[in-house]
Amino acid sequence: MNQNKLNMAKKNNIPQVKNEEQYEALRDKGYSKQKSARIANTPDSGTKGGRSSKYEERTKKELYEKARHVGIKGRSKMNKEELIEALRNN
């Protein structure tokens, strides 16, 4: 990792991001700092997986549990479509 990326991470108060390049690319796409860091810190970040089912194919209960795990507030009052939107935009 080059020094500029490390300085950028420190400047932005990013807690140790494992894949700085991916983090910055996600931020450029408009992802939140939290979501960008979470994605960039996964062990297999940057590799294609495609194994998980689409949100639309999951039950409301499954979406609720995912939202709980991610820490989305107000999830108990959300319907399935709102949970999907919150998960995609968090």
Image (cartoon, rainbow, N blue to C red):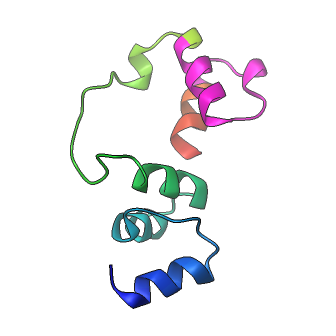
- The image shows residue 7 at horizontal and vertical percentages of 51, 87
Q: Is residue 60 above or below residue 14?
A: above
Note whether residue 82 is visible.
no
The image quarter containing residue 77 is top right
> Which residue is located at x 68 percent, y 35 percent?
71
| Residue 72 lies in the magenta-colored region | yes
Question: Looking at the image, how many numbered discs can be counted on the residues?
Answer: 0
Horizontal side of residue 10 vs 44, given as left or right:
right
Image quadrant containing the C terminus: top right
> Which residue is located at x 51 percent, y 40 percent?
88
The image quarter containing residue 24 is bottom left
Image quadrant containing the N terminus: bottom left
Taking the view exactly as shown, the residue that stands out farthest to the bottom is 4
In the image, the segment drawn in magenta is: 62-81
Q: Is residue 90 above or below residue 63?
A: below
Main secondary structure type of the part rendered in magenta? helix
| Residue 3 lies in the magenta-colored region | no
- The image shows residue 30 at horizontal and vertical percentages of 51, 63
> Which residue is located at x 35 percent, y 71 percent?
21
The image quarter containing residue 53 is top left
> Which residue is located at x 55 percent, y 25 percent?
66
- The image shows residue 48 at horizontal and vertical percentages of 21, 44
Note whether residue 13 is visible.
yes
Horizontal side of residue 58 vs 84, given as left or right:
left
In depth, the one of 26 and 14 nearer the eye is: 14
Q: Is residue 13 above or below residue 61?
A: below
- The image shows residue 31 at horizontal and vertical percentages of 51, 58
